[in-house]
Amino acid sequence: ETGVTQTPRHLVMGMTNKKSLKCEQHLGHNAMYWYKQSAKKPLELMFVYSLEERVENNSVPSRFSPECPNSSHLFLHLHTLQPEDSALYLCASSQDRTQGAEDGYTFGSGTRLTVV
Amino acid sequence: LAKTTQPISMDSYEGQEVNITCSHNNIATNDYITWYQQFPSQGPRFIIQGYKTKVTNEVASLFIPADRKSSTLSLPRVSLSDTAVYYCLVGDRAVMNTGFQKLVFGTGTRLLVSP
């Protein structure tokens, strides 16, 4: 385990379903992120939460809805997805700094989502 | 936002040293250079980070010339398990309420290590 746990590891859902992805970190980090990785594409930053406040939304469709109830948990609620939303969804956390070096992100193992 | 350019793929054999170079001509004064490793169906893993000169840890070395317009990740004596995608990132410091780092990933370098 990397310190960031994502569940489920695999998810198959129909276009009319509603599901949620869960991310949990026990590293004491105060920033959490959702990334999407499609086949043969770079990682795309979707959402950023810092101190439980959403500070970034990279033009993500409204069918993806994030939630950060506390600094250790992050959810991604999914509804009425499209087949092109099939991808590996990665959660990450970091300890932000106002100065100096970033220690780097810690990523979870991801949720492999297939929309049918 | 500093753009990075790195080779799409590299091949090597077990026991060899591998050097992956990344270009970042527009690096800003406060930017740091970070390398990540990603295995299939897993999240990227932080390898090493540096600002200038040379940084070494138990996994790799990072060489950064004085002009900081490029950097080289050096993996000593690679093994089959080093087959992965390696990402070079330049820190995009977005100083908002808390000054968090928002890193942007490129396409990476796919390293294949053969027996």
Image: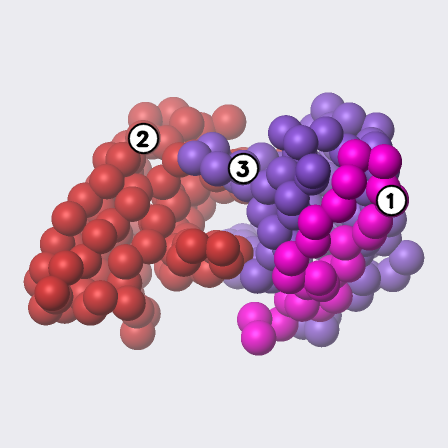
Chain colours: A purple, B red
Q: Residue at x 33, y 55 (%)?
A: B84
Nearer-N-terminus badge (3/1): 1
Residue A72 is one of the magenta-drawn residues: no
Where is residue B77 shown, x and y percent of the image?
14, 68
Rendered view: B3 above or below B16: above
Question: Would you name the residue on which mark 3 appears?
Answer: A38
Q: Residue at x 71, y 62 (%)?
A: A8
Residue A73 visible in image: yes
Where is residue B90 shown, x and y percent of the image?
44, 39
Numbered marks: total: 3
Residue A15 is one of the magenta-drawn residues: yes
Viewed as shown, does residue A58 lie left or right of A73? left
Q: Chain of mark 2?
A: B
Rendered view: A53 above or below A1: above
In this rendered view, identify the residue nearer to me: A48 or A10. A10
Q: Chain of mark 3?
A: A
Rendered view: A39 above or below A31: above
For the N terminus of chain A, the image quarter is bottom right
Question: Would you name the residue on which mark 1 appears?
Answer: A18
Q: CA distance from mark 2 to mark 1?
A: 39 Å
Task: Say which of marks 3 and 2 sits in front.
Answer: 3
Q: Quadrant of residue A86?
A: top right
User: Which amino acid does the dot numbered 1 rest on?
Assistant: Lys
> Which residues fall within the magenta stretch?
A1-25
Residue B102 visible in image: no
Q: Main secondary structure of the magenta part?
A: strand
Question: Would you name the residue on which mark 2 appears?
Answer: B5
- Identify the disc placed on residue B41: none
Q: Residue furthest right?
A: A69
Q: CA distance from mark 3 to mark 2?
A: 20 Å
